[in-house]
């Protein structure tokens, strides 16, 4: 029987191989985690046409990943709260580095490289009280941990590098969880926030939803001009239908994007992923619980619904959006409707992560 420990040991034993670029592994455009029919887990690279460029094994369920900007290596993160973060060679699946958070921390499913690829920033929370931290890792020194700073919030999840190349946008979900079973402990007092920091942790701006404090900010999308989209998950009274998508530009108040009441209710209070369209004129969120994708203009006007069972993964595409579902489907969503691209014998997990910013 192969244990998680022996699995990692066998991959690490493969050793690091010379660094190569993304073209050497089929020139993929996206990273996606999935569960395979035999119950094992993988990280795959997908091209813009939905075809698979590569797949490498993961020791347990993955959540999201981050691609090095130059080398064909990626960090795969476990589902929150994370017990692993693995840097893998995308040619052969060799584990180049296994990241270990400090003893009192958990990885929270997301990370992002600096534009030059020399730093990796990881989303983390303190086990005791879910206070948020960003870990800083030196990718040129065997991914050694060289620092950290507070996110100035609780339960951080997604984080992205802003288009200026020197600012982080951090989604503080606001939820304190039990260290063992993820029980939510502070729903009556939670305070989600979108925080902007410099790479050294200096807080540059903080955006909070004071009137919807039980709407947990989870995932982020960026447009090249600095507009931020944030997807939310409702933690308040069941049956409510708050907006699940927000837009924010630094120095301005957030804009909440509302769907018609019936459509909002059908989302079941849960937005799983968010992305701008390829030309930036639209933004969309997905709900695997509701089996639907909601499209909005970049100004926040509701444009319509795409129905798809267990849809969650979402990313920009030159023709609109590319999306994935838990049944193995990958599809193109554009002005002309939905076009199936492929179906895999794998259950795609939450996200499609663009390899190139």
Image: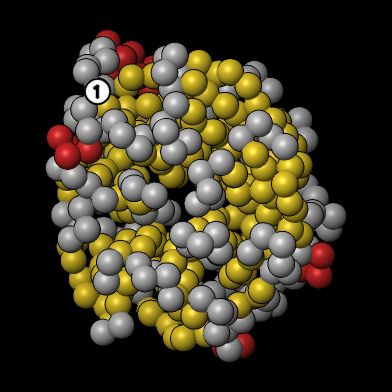
Quarter of image, res 220: bottom right
Q: Nearer the viewer, residue 271 or 21?
A: 21
Q: Is residue 300 visible?
A: yes
At 46% from the left and 86% from the top, the residue drawn is 303
Quarter of image, res 270: bottom right
From this view, report whether residue 144 is shown above or below residue 343: above
Sort mark 1 into few (<14), some (14-19) or many (20+) by Cα contacts within 10 Å: few
At 50% from the left and 58% from the top, the residue drawn is 222
Left or right, 168 with respect to 315, comes to right
- Which residue is disc 1 drawn over? 19
Residue 130: percent from left, percent from top: 72, 38
Of the 4 image quadrants, the one containing the N terminus is top left
Left or right, 309 with respect to 286, comes to left
Left or right, 324 with respect to 119, comes to left
At 41% from the left and 31% from the top, the residue drawn is 117
Q: Nearer the viewer, residue 226 or 148?
A: 226
As drawn, the residue found furthest toward the right would be 189
């Amino acid at each position: 029987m192969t244990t998680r420990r022996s699995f990692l040991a066998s991959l690490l034993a493969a050793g690091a191989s010379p660094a190569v670029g993304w073209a050497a592994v089929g020139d993929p455009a996206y990273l996606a985690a999935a569960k395979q029919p035999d119950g094992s887990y993988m990280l795959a690279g997908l091209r813009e046409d939905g075809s698979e460029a590569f797949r490498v094994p993961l020791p347990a369920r993955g959540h999201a990943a981050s691609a090095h900007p130059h080398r064909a290596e990626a960090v795969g993160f476990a589902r929150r709260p994370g017990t692993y973060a693995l840097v893998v060679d995308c040619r052969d699946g060799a584990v180049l580095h296994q990241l270990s958070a400090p003893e009192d921390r958990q990885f929270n499913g997301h990370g992002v490289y600096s534009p030059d690829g020399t730093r990796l920033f990881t989303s983390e929370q303190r086990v005791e009280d879910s206070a948020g931290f960003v870990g800083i890792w030196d990718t040129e020194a065997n991914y050694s941990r060289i620092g950290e700073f507070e996110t100035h919030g609780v339960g951080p999840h997604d984080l992205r590098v802003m288009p200026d190349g020197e600012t982080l946008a951090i989604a503080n979900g606001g939820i304190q969880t039990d260290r063992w079973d993820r029980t939510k402990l502070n729903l009556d007092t939670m305070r989600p926030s979108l925080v902007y920091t410099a790479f050294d942790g200096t807080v540059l701006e903080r955006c909070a939803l004071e009137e919807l404090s039980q709407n947990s900010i989870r995932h982020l999308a960026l447009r090249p001009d600095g507009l931020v989209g944030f997807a939310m998950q409702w933690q308040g009274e069941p049956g409510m239908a708050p907006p699940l998508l927000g837009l924010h530009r630094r120095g301005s108040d957030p804009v909440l994007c509302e769907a018609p009441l019936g459509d909002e209710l059908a989302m079941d209070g849960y937005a799983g992923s968010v992305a701008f369209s390829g030309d930036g004129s639209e933004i969309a969120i997905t709900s695997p619980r509701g089996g639907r994708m909601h499209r909005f203009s970049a100004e926040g006007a509701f444009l319509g619904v795409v129905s798809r069972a267990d849809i969650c993964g979402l990313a920009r595409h030159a023709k609109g959006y590319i999306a994935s579902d838990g049944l193995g489907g990958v599809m193109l969503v554009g002005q002309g409707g939905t076009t199936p691209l492929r179906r895999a014998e794998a259950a795609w997990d939450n996200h499609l992560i663009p390899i190139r910013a």
